[in-house]
Amino acid sequence: IKFGLMTFDSIGTLTDRPPLVLQSTFQTAPFPADSLATKGMYSYAGDKPYTFPGAVPTVYMLNSGARSSIASEGGLVSVGADSTAAMTSTNASIQETARQR
């Protein structure tokens, strides 16, 4: 049995922005890069446009997903290769990530 670790962020836009951001703003620099870094909680899920049914057709953008492996806390830990050394390394990475919380 092999294990990996995936944690999720709860920030749909950026930590210093409101929860609703227009699609045009979300797609304008430096927003996309910030979304992949600290302000966006290192999300690597795809950016998704959304609207509110029955409301004025304003398009917002959201990215709330798994944290990437470069996250300083709670980063993705891959299951690794099929070797004892890789499993030992993966276990150590998971243990270290769990201690950071």
Image (cartoon, rainbow, N blue to C red):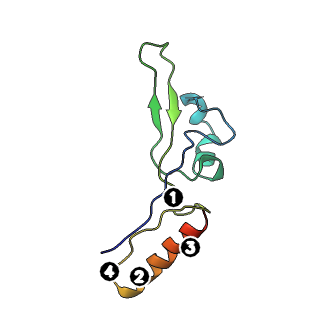
Instruction: Give coordinates of residue 87: x percent, y percent.
Output: 39, 80
Q: Quadrant of residue 28?
A: top right
Of helix, strand and loop, which one carries label 4? loop
The residue that appears at 59% across and 51% down in the rendered structure is: 41
In space, the residues marked 3 and 1 are separated at their CA atoms by 16 Å
Given residues 58 and 41, the one toward you in this image is 41
Which of marks 1 and 4 precedes in the sequence? Answer: 1
Instruction: Give coordinates of residue 15: x percent, y percent.
Output: 66, 42
Q: Which residue carries the number 2 mark? A: 86
Of helix, strand and loop, which one carries label 1? loop
Which of marks 4 and 3 precedes in the sequence? Answer: 4
In space, the residues marked 4 and 1 are separated at their CA atoms by 22 Å
Residue 27, compared with residue 3, is above or below; it is: above
In space, the residues marked 3 and 2 are separated at their CA atoms by 15 Å
Which of marks 2 and 1 precedes in the sequence? Answer: 1
Instruction: Categorize mark 2 by other alpha carbons within 10 Å: few (<14), some (14-19), many (20+).
Output: few
Q: Nearer the viewer, mark 3 or mark 1?
A: 3
In the drawing, what numbered circle is on residue 34?
A: none
Q: Which residue carries the number 4 mark? A: 82
Instruction: Give coordinates of residue 83: x percent, y percent.
Output: 34, 84
Type of the residue with mark 3: Glu
The residue that appears at 59% across and 46% down in the rendered structure is: 35
The C terminus sits in image quarter: bottom right
The N terminus sits in image quarter: bottom left
> Residue extending furthest right?
16
